Amino acid sequence: MIKPTDTHQPFTMNSPDEFDQLLTRQLRDSQDYLADDGFTAGVMAQLDNRPALSRRAQWLITGIPLVLISGIVFSQLPVQDIGLMVGNSLETLAPVTVIKLGAMLSGGIILASLGWLARQARLL
């Protein structure tokens, strides 16, 4: 039990880098080097160096199940009912409101396109 008169101070770190350095020193100092006489190099040389799946195969492996599952999910949606609800809601809106919504949607699409282009050009 620690008494109030004890002057024990907890060990604190000023930055995460100091903690990493402390761990690195502790691991380096606590373990002796074990010579493997080239064992690791031999194992690495015998590993299979074939490339991973081609980009096309990766797209097929992920794309086909995605399309099938999406089709099953969308086939269960009440598309006709949703269309009627949206249509009825748009009929009750004033024409100015529909124009404002269209302008906002167009602006969002333009901003998203500009963001994508900036990212492709590595500006962001």
Image: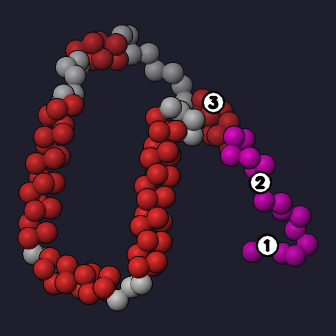
Which of the marked residues, 1 or 3, is nearer the chain's N terminus? 1
Q: Position of residue 117 (x, y in %)?
A: 47, 39
Return the x and y of residue 22 as percentages of the image width and height.
68, 39
SS type, badge 2? loop
10 left or right of 30 in image: right
User: Is the Cβ of the residue at disc 2 closer than 8 Å to that at disc 3?
Assistant: no
Spatial distance from mark 2 to mark 3, Cα to Cα? 21 Å
Q: Image check: 35 left or right of 54?
A: right
| Vertical order, 69 against 90 (above or below) | above
- Badge 1: residue crowd in 10 Å (few <14, some 14–19, many ≥20): few
Task: Specify the label residue 29 is tagged with.
Answer: 3
Q: CA distance from mark 1 to mark 3?
A: 31 Å
39 up-or-down from 120: above or below? above
In percent of the image, x 46 and y 64: which residue is there? 103
> Could you tell me which secondary element the residue under label 1 belongs to?
loop
Q: Position of residue 21 (x, y in %)?
A: 68, 36
47 or 96, which is in the foreground? 96
User: What is the quadrant of residue 10 in the picture?
Assistant: bottom right
Name which residue lies at 74% across and 47% down: 15
| Residue nearest the observer in this picture, 92 or 111 | 92
Identified by mark 2, the residue type is Thr
Nearest to viewer (mark 2 / mark 1): 2
Labelled disc at residue 12? 2
Q: Quadrant of the C terminus?
A: top right
Q: Viewer-proximal residue, 59 or 35?
A: 59
Q: Which residues are magenta?
A: 1-18
Residue located beneath label 1 in the image: 2
Residue 3 in the magenta stretch? The answer is yes
Judged by depth in the image, the label closer to the viewer, 1 or 3, is 3
Q: Quadrant of residue 109?
A: bottom left
Mark 1 vs 3: CB contact within 8 A: no
